[in-house]
Image (spheres, grey):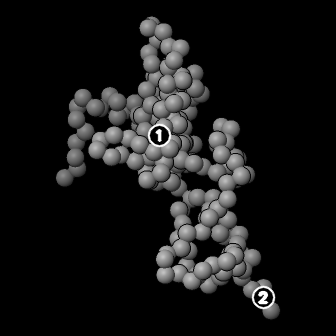
Amino acid sequence: RKEEIPKSWKPLSRELSKPFTGDLDEMRKRGIVRVLVSYNRTNYFIDEAKAFGFEYELMEQFRKFLNKRTTRKQLKTAFVFLPVPFDRLIPYLNEGRGDIAAAGLTVTAKRAGKIAFSDPYLSGVREVLVAAPATETIRDVDGLSGREVHLLRGSSYAQHLQDVNRRLQPLPA
């Protein structure tokens, strides 16, 4: 049996699901910014009915900044956080199913061709391999050859690993 949305929520549900691709001024007129987030222990998570996470805190500071100069006649802008699978952030943003993607997205040429980025809040980030405790030490990227590697689908790490994989494959004889 499909669970029904309470009647009092239906106008909000309808507004949140309606495709929209306006700019910030239009979002403020609408009164809602839909923030697409990737649910995880770092960026966005719920604990005892309260939201937490690095991206959540950044977006809360942005919301406060936007609403700081709001007059009594103006509606304050509400931020609604919508958890989605990481690999759906950019497609959903382009489909107008969210207004901001806040998930620690790395700026890549491929992504920059699809969406507009803000100025990065971190730069010079190095990728770090984390292995299970019983794993033999991997000293360099060549040590990944022949190993199974797990990573977040849709992440820039996936593209980097594909590049490494092509480099490690033997050339045809």
Circle 2 sits on which residue?
A: 172
Let me know if residue 92 appears in the view.
no
Q: Residue at (54%, 23%) from the top-left corner? A: 65
Q: Amino acid at mark 1?
A: Tyr
Quarter location, residue 147: bottom right
**Distance of label 2 from label 1 (alpha carbons):** 48 Å
**Amino acid tagged 2:** Pro
Q: Which residue is mark 1?
A: 56
In front here: 144 or 27?
A: 144
Along the line of sight, the residue nearer the viewer: 158 or 12:
158
- The mark nearer the N terminus, 2 or 1, is 1
Q: Please identify, in this view, whether the residue under mark 2 or under mark 1 is nearer the observer.
A: 1
Q: Is residue 106 visible?
A: yes
Q: x, y (%) of residue 146?
A: 62, 84
Q: Secondary structure at mark 1?
A: helix
Is 55 placed left or right of 45 in the picture? Answer: right
- Residue 143 drawn at (x, y percent): 66, 80
Q: Residue furthest right?
A: 173
Taking the image as shown, residue 88 lies to the left or right of residue 50, namely right
Q: Residue at x 40, y 30 (%)?
A: 15
Disc 2 secondary structure class: loop
| Residue depicted at 67% across the width and 65% down the height | 160
How many other residues sit within 10 Å of disc 2, few (<14), some (14-19) or many (≥20)?
Answer: few
Residue 49 percent coordinates (x, y): 29, 41
Could you tell whether 52 is left or right of 137 in the image? left
Q: Residue at x 55, y 79 (%)?
A: 148
Q: Looking at the picture, how far across and down is residue 133, in whole percent? A: 49, 77
